[in-house]
Image (cartoon, helix red, strand yellow):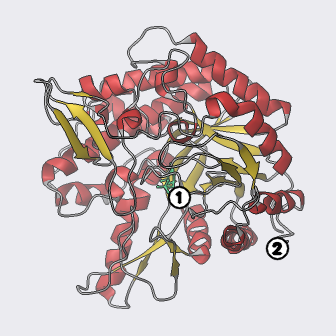
């Protein structure tokens, strides 16, 4: 069996981490433009001034970034670098980069559309034509090489104006604004783009929330998610009306959870982790209604959601065509105290002695990918894509080359795991590796956490001439694609 003949091999990126050109072509700012660089030890910050003009620097609170005071606004402060602004400058290098993707034989390229490039504040009546033109040129360039675009409509970048004036996604006024944006994308790029994802890693909003957060925080997080579910469902419906050929997916951050011990309490706890962290979002987006266990999750934090009859109808009518997810790690979870916790950005859970951890504390676990693929396909029975997977690592340039064997060693068992899942019946149709070209890290804002098959000369201090070249892993991936996943041998 193995990979299907028309399997989509490729790579993935996101506008806020890759595109740059933050203040060009009529683009409006997004919150990521006011988020500083950080590291595995030092969290990223957002910078802002209060109504009296006093500067503030606060830790970025993922998925709830509204500034705490009325009259405050995000501001650039001296002494800080804002790496997402220029990122690795796809804006000015897209032709070169797409030619490199083509050289590696990509069949699919995942990217996102920056909302504020199409609607600079989010509230304009008419879209920014220069923004539309930019993406149209990109899609035409991809088509020139027969590379299928896979487009994420929202990848962590709401226009700043909406963050400051409406308070982000906990305000349901964002729903019609997003729907307008999505409609514009479906209309303008009809015939150029067929595969779409509505919200990137939509489950992050609650999956990474510690249980000890207060009830208000949970109330806002679940409302935020509900508003995104409705926005996504409406977009799916409109996308199908505009072009029945469109295939539209959800996108879930796919962590594989394991019970750390055989204590039945851990087995049950693990099941709850899957429900809250992974299934809650997939169930709503694939089945069109809230699962039975949702009430329990809300009750745990006294959450009372604003859900209208119309919302329930929208959710039913806007179910997705594909299930897609990112996969970087598994996590072992336990109810027992005193176990050694893993230390890494975005990761919680306890150390699994069977696994090796990346320099950023992520548990490397290809078997976990097979486990998730089989479990998720069995639940949803719709085509499935792995739209992010990869190794963030320190790369050294030697004589204009990067010998990144460690990255090849990472990919080989992950690709084998996908092949095994396919052999066991999973309808896997695409694999787009994360950060196929070096991009700014979402979690830490670093450049030195590199994932790419393509190296970009850009560094944490903002220096670098942006020249690009293919690393050893990129030449290896080319062979993998040519052989449709049958030749994984190392050079
Ligand atoms: C996912 C995001 C991506 C990406 C990736 C790697 O959560 O969808 O945007 O960045 O993780 O994470 P990081 O960049 O923190 O290494």
Q: How many marks?
A: 2
Rendered residue at 35%/35% (across/down): 34
Res. 128 visible in picture:
yes
Query: Foreground residue, 491 or 319?
Result: 491
98 or 23: which is nearer to us? 23
Q: Is residue 234 above or below residue 291?
A: above
The structure residue drawn at horizontal position 48% and vertical position 22%, both measured from the top left corner, is 23
Q: Secondary structure at mark 1?
A: loop
- Residue at the far right: name it: 483
Mark 1 vs mark 2, foreground winner is 1
Residue at 22% from the left image edge and 45% from the top image edge: 58
Where is residue 111, by image quadrant? top right
Mark 1 touching mark 2, by CB under 8 A?
no
Q: Which quadrant would the N terminus be assigned to in this image?
A: bottom right
* Residue beneath the point at 34% across and 61% down: 276
Residue 166 at x, y = what percent? Answer: 26, 25
Disc 1 beta carbon < 8 A from ligand 1? yes
Q: Is residue 91 left or right of residue 37?
A: right
Q: Is residue 257 above or below residue 27?
A: below
Q: Quadrant of residue 145?
A: top right
Residue at label 2?
490
Quadrant including the C terminus? bottom right
Q: Which residue bears the numbered disc 1?
A: 449
The kind of secondary structure element at disc 2 is loop
């Amino acid at each position: 069996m193995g990979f299907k003949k028309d399997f989509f091999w490729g790579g993935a990126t996101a506008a806020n981490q890759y595109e740059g050109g933050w203040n060009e072509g009529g683009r409006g700012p997004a919150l990521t433009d006011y988020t500083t660089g950080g590291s595995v030890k030092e969290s990223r910050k957002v910078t802002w001034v209060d109504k009296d003009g006093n500067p503030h620097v606060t830790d970025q609170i993922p998925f709830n970034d509204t500034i705490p005071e009325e009259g405050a606004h995000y501001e650039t402060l001296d002494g800080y670098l804002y790496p997402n602004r220029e990122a690795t400058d796809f804006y000015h290098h897209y032709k070169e980069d797409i030619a490199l993707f083509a050289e590696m034989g990509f069949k699919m390229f995942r990217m996102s559309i920056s909302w504020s490039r199409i609607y600079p504040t989010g509230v304009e009546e008419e879209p920014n034509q220069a923004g539309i033109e930019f993406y149209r040129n990109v899609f035409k360039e991809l088509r020139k090489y027969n590379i299928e675009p896979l487009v994420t409509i929202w990848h962590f970048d709401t226009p700043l104006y909406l963050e400051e004036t409406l308070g982000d996604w906990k305000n349901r006024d964002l729903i019609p604004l997003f729907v307008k944006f999505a409609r514009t994308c479906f209309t303008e790029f009809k015939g150029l783009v067929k595969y779409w994802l509505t919200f990137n890693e939509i489950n992050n909003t609650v999956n990474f929330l510690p249980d000890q957060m207060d009830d208000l925080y949970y109330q806002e997080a679940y409302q935020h998610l509900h508003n995104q579910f409705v926005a996504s469902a409406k977009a799916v419906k409109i996308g199908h009306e505009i072009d029945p050929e469109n295939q539209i997916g959800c996108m879930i951050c796919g962590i594989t959870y394991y019970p750390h011990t055989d204590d039945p309490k851990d087995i049950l706890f693990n099941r709850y982790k899957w429900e809250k962290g992974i299934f809650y979002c997939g169930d709503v987006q694939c089945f069109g209604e809230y699962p039975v266990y949702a009430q329990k999750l809300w009750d745990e934090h006294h959450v009372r959601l604003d859900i209208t009859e119309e919302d329930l109808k929208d959710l039913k009518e806007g179910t997705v065509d594909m299930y897609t997810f990112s996969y970087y790690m598994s996590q072992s979870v336990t109810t027992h105290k005193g176990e050694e916790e893993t230390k890494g950005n975005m990761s919680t859970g306890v150390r699994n002695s069977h696994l090796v951890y990346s320099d950023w504390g992520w548990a490397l676990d290809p078997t976990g990918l097979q486990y998730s693929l089989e479990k998720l396909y069995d639940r949803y029975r719709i085509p499935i894509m792995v739209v992010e997977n990869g190794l963030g690592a320190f790369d050294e340039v030697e004589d204009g080359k990067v010998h990144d064997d460690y990255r090849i060693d990472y990919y080989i068992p992950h690709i084998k795991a996908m092949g095994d899942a396919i052999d066991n019946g999973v309808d896997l149709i695409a694999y787009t590796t994360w950060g196929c070209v070096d991009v700014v890290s979402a979690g830490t804002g670093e450049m030195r956490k590199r994932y790419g098959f393509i190296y970009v000369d850009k560094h944490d201090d903002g220096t670098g001439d942006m020249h690009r070249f293919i690393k050893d892993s990129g030449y290896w991936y080319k062979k993998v694609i040519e052989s449709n996943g049958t030749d994984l041998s190392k050079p």
